[in-house]
Image (cartoon, rainbow, N blue to C red):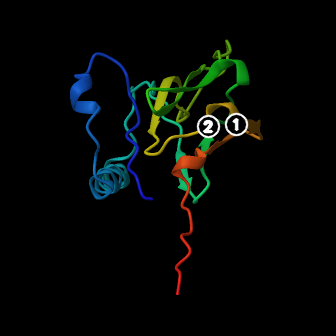
Amino acid sequence: MARNLTPWRGGARNLALWDMPVPRWFENFRREMDDLFEQFFGPETGREMVVFAPRTNVAETEKEYEITVDLPGVKPEDFNVELKEGCLWITGERRQEHQEEGKTYHRIERTYGQFRRVIPLEVPTDPEKIQAEYKDGVLRIVVPKDESAQPKKIPVKT
């Protein structure tokens, strides 16, 4: 199962536009162009990094979905995992560290802010058996599929 997950960027943008899936090639192209401009003109200065969209992997087997989300520096009480409307919702906030007096920052690249990742689950799942574990900055969620959704072998009589 291959899926595109569009990071939620919040703000005052038109949410209907950002809810549409973006093809992976387009997202890769955008990143490559950003890198190219940065190589020629240097990094943008004066821009405050306020967007945080954690990188997410979604894998599927015959029996379950496995979702891993990179959440370095986020405390477990700062994010939520919910199953609603046939989707797995991962929401939260990565808080910005306070800048210390007398310290001069030459580069700030870490991103902060609220985030929301919504992962559609195409088959019925068993909500009572969902497991979530947070270790070393990585959230791992296992969502077992319902028995009715798992493939069944049909014996063929001869």
Q: What element carries label 1?
A: helix
Q: Can residue 66 be seen in this view?
A: no
Quadrant assignment, res 104: top right
Q: Residues within 10 Å of mark 1 (few under 14, many from 20)?
A: few
Q: Mark 1 points at which residue?
A: 129
Which residue lies most toward the bottom here?
158
Locate residue 96, reporting x and y percent.
Answer: 60, 20
Of 16 and 72, nearer the camera is 16
Which residue lies most toward the right here?
135
The residue lying at 74 percent from left, 36 percent from top is: 134
Q: Vertically, is 128 above or below 135?
A: above
Locate residue 67, reporting x and y percent.
Answer: 59, 45
Quadrant assignment, res 20: top left
The residue lying at 39 percent from left, 30 percent from top is: 8
Dot 1 amino acid type = Lys
Contact (Cβ within 8 Å) of mark 1 with mark 2: yes
Image-based side of 12 in relation to 141, left or right? left
Locate residue 131, reporting x and y percent.
Answer: 71, 37
Image-based side of 98 in relation to 150, left or right? right
Q: What element carries label 2?
A: loop
Dot 2 amino acid type = Asp
Q: Name the residue under label 2.
A: 126
Q: How crowded is mark 2: few (under 14 residues within 10 Å), some or many (20 or more)?
A: few
